[in-house]
Amino acid sequence: MRTDRVLLIKGLRYLTYTVILMFLAPIVVWQAFKNQDHAFYIPVLVVGCLLGVAAIAMGFVSIKTIVDSLFGKKKS
């Protein structure tokens, strides 16, 4: 069994997006809590929470893609 390089590169690209989201989500949430008296407090907080959920989801997708590239897809 050999490593699927195309799938591995795709997984590493997803992992890069995950790392970006992992840094971006807390920054956006922090900015929301820093400006609680501003009119856009709730929308910015919601966007930050959605970015956090997206970071978690992309983490699972990227790890699954990398594992599939290394070990192959499960055959049932």
Image: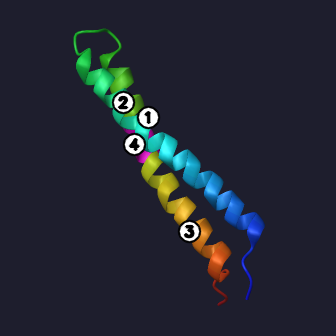
Q: Which stretch appears magenta?
A: 49-54
Could you tell me which secondary element the residue under label 1 belongs to? helix
Q: Which of marks 4 and 3 is nearer the N terminus?
A: 4
The residue under label 3 is which amino acid type?
Answer: Lys
Mark on residue 27? Answer: 2
Residue count near mark 1 (Cα–Cα under 10 Å), binned few <14, some 14–19, many ≥20: some
Q: Which of marks 3 and 2 is in front?
A: 2
Mark on residue 24? Answer: 1
Q: How far apart are marks 1 and 4 (CA)?
A: 8 Å
Instruction: Tell me which corner region of the image, top left, top right, bottom left or bottom right, holds residue 76.
Output: bottom right
Q: Which of 25 and 41 is in front in this view?
A: 25
Which residue is disc 3 drawn over? Answer: 64
In the picture, measured across the screen, residue 38 lies left or right of residue 66, that is left
Q: Earlier in the sequence, mark 3 or mark 2?
A: 2
Q: Relative to residue 15, is residue 44 depicted above or below?
A: above
Residue 75, position as x, y percentages in the image? 67, 88
